[in-house]
Image (spheres, helix red, strand yellow):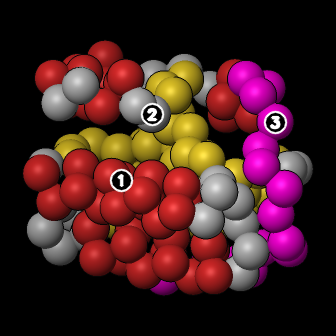
């Protein structure tokens, strides 16, 4: 199975919904989607991984790279992860201490305002 990535807006946030398997094969697709989204002016990004079946160290690396890219530009990343099994991976790596993890997109979008951003560019992998 491969990774699927869909882009939507939850103003002022941009949401990348990631499904399937975020592994060695799928992580580059997420990295590319984040690069394109941030280059389009996005400063508030929600990664919705509620449809993710599997994540490995390459997937974790892609999420950390997204966080780094956004923070270097004054932006912020929030994660939507209702699955206890997937969330546990982030907790084991202590990433739940530096990335806000929520159960829903509404919870992530309402937790705090996104940093000011220019208009974002839709992403199609």
Q: Residue under circle 1?
A: 63
Residue shown at the point (70%, 59%) measured from the top left? 43
CA–CA distance in space, label 1 to label 3? 20 Å
* Residue projecting furthest to the top: 84
Quarter holding the N terminus is bottom left
> How crowded is the residue under tag 1: few (<14 C-alpha within 10 Å), some, or many (20+)?
many
Q: Residue under circle 3?
A: 113
Percent coordinates x, y for residue 100 in the rendering: 51, 28
> Tag 2 or tag 3, which sits nearer the N-term?
2
Question: Who is closer to the viewer here, 92 or 6?
Answer: 92
Residue shown at the point (62%, 73%) measured from the top left? 38
Please state the extent of the stretch shown in magenta in the rendering. Answer: 110-125
> Tag 3 or tag 1, which sits nearer the N-term?
1
Is residue 112 in view? yes
CA–CA distance in space, label 3 to label 2? 15 Å
> Tag 1 or tag 2, which sits nearer the N-term?
1
Percent coordinates x, y for residue 47 in the rendering: 52, 48
Question: From the viewer's perspective, is the residue at label 1 or at label 3 nearer?
Answer: 3
Residue 122: image quadrant is bottom right
**C-beta proximity under 8 Å, tags 3 and 2:** no
Residue 61: image quadrant is bottom left
Percent coordinates x, y for residue 15 in the rendering: 66, 53
Q: Residue under circle 2?
A: 99
**C-beta proximity under 8 Å, tags 1 and 3:** no
């Amino acid at each position: 199975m491969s990774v699927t990535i869909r882009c939507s807006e939850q103003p002022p946030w941009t949401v990348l919904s990631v499904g399937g398997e975020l592994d060695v094969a799928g992580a580059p697709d997420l990295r590319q989607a984040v690069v394109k989204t941030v280059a389009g002016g996005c400063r508030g990004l929600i990664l919705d991984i509620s449809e993710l079946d599997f994540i490995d160290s390459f997937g974790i690396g892609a999420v950390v790279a997204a966080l780094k890219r956004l923070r270097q530009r004054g932006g912020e990343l929030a994660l939507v992860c209702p699955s206890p099994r997937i969330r546990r991976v982030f907790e084991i790596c202590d990433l739940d201490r530096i990335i806000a993890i929520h159960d829903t997109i509404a919870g992530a979008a309402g937790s705090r305002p996104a940093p000011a951003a220019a208009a974002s560019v839709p992403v199609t992998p």
